[in-house]
Amino acid sequence: MDFLAQYNLTGLVIGAATFLIIGLFHPLVIKGEYHFGVKIWWAFLMMGIAAIATSIAVRHILWSTLLAVWGASSLWSIGELFEQQKRVAKGWFPKNPARRYPESCQ
């Protein structure tokens, strides 16, 4: 960590990690909605609350920031789950044939 601070790379690492975290949540939302529907929104809520609470408790700026980004991405994904359900209803993404969909998605 001293290396990052010495060469002023902390911001670059935070930016790259943020990009990767957000990129990770995109397929998580798509696959999560496909396999479980929107009923897993509470898992994203719990993960978001836990990550944000932990980011407050962690004193190291790099880890605190990355936990906060993880938490914010988790909370943002709740809305994206419901948007993904709408995208599936529009036919933009495939429906899971093994799952029942609400009338609005038929």
Image (cartoon, rainbow, N blue to C red):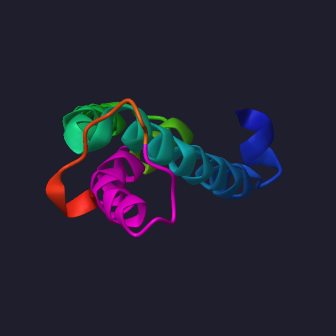
Q: Position of residue 64 (x, y in %)?
A: 44, 40
Please say whether residue 30 is one of the residues in the magenta stretch.
Answer: no
Q: Which residue range is magenta in the image?
A: 70-95
Q: Position of residue 18 (x, y in %)?
A: 59, 53
Residue at 71%, 49% in the rendered image: 13
Q: Position of residue 3 (x, y in %)?
A: 80, 37
Quadrant in which the N terminus appears? top right
Residue at 51%, 36% in the rendered image: 63
Quadrant in which the C terminus appears? bottom left
Residue at 56%, 45% in the rendered image: 27
Q: Position of residue 98 (x, y in %)?
A: 38, 29
Q: Quadrant of residue 67?
A: top left
Q: Nearer the viewer, residue 9 or 34?
A: 34
**Above or below, 48 relative to 35:** below
Main SS of the magenta segment? helix
Please say whether residue 80 is one of the residues in the magenta stretch.
Answer: yes
Residue 61 visible within the image: no
Q: Nearer the viewer, residue 48 or 68?
A: 48
Residue at 48%, 47% in the rendered image: 30
Q: Nearer the viewer, residue 93 or 38?
A: 93
Does residue 51 appear left or right of residue 93 in this picture? left
Q: What is the count of numbered marks? A: 0
